[in-house]
Image (tube, rainbow, N blue to C red):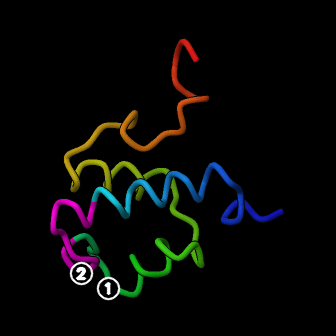
Amino acid sequence: MKSIYDEDYIEIITRLRIIRTSKNITQLDLAKKTQSFVSKIESCERRLDVIEFLRWLDTLNISFSDVIPSKYTKGE
C-alpha cells in the first residue's frame, strides 16, 4: 500500500486542508512553488515530505498536535 493511501496520512492532509481553508489561506498563498503542488498534496496525488510538512505547520501557524491523529500523541 502506498503511503499516500494510508488512513493516517489522509487524516493529516485533511486536517491541514481544513485548517488552511478556515484561515482563508489559498493554495497559492501556501505554496512556495505552484498552486498545483498544494493541490496534488491535498488530493493525495503527491506525498508531503517531513520538511514540507514542517513548513506548512509554520505557514499555517499551527502545531504538530493540531493535525496528528490522537493515537500518535502522548498519553493516548
Cα–Cα span, label 1 and label 2: 6 Å
Tag 1's secondary structure? Answer: loop
Q: Name the residue located 31 percent from the left edge and 80 percent from the top edge.
A: 33
Quadrant location of the C terminus in the rendered image: top right
Q: In this view, does 14 lie above or below 44?
A: above
Q: Name the residue located 52 percent from the left edge and 16 percent from the top edge.
A: 74
Q: Mark 1 points at which residue?
A: 34
- Left or right, 43 with respect to 23, comes to right
The image position of residue 7, as x and y in percent, is 68, 54
Of callouts 1 and 2, the N-terminal one: 2
Segment colored magenta: 20-29
Q: Name the residue under label 2.
A: 28
In magenta stretch: residue 14: no
Q: Is residue 31 above or below residue 11?
A: below
The image position of residue 4, as x and y in percent, is 66, 65
Quarter of image, res 47: bottom right
Q: In this view, does 39 lie above or below 72?
A: below
Neighbour tally class for label 1: few under 14, some 14-19, many 20 plus, Cα within 10 Å: few
Pointer 1 and pointer 2: residues touching (CB < 8 Å)?
A: yes
Quarter of image, res 3: bottom right
The image position of residue 16, as x and y in percent, is 38, 57
- Which of 41/14 is in front? 14
Tag 2's secondary structure? Answer: helix
Quadrant location of the N terminus in the rendered image: bottom right
- Which of 12/36 is in front? 12
Q: How many numbered discs?
A: 2
Which amino acid, mark 1?
Thr
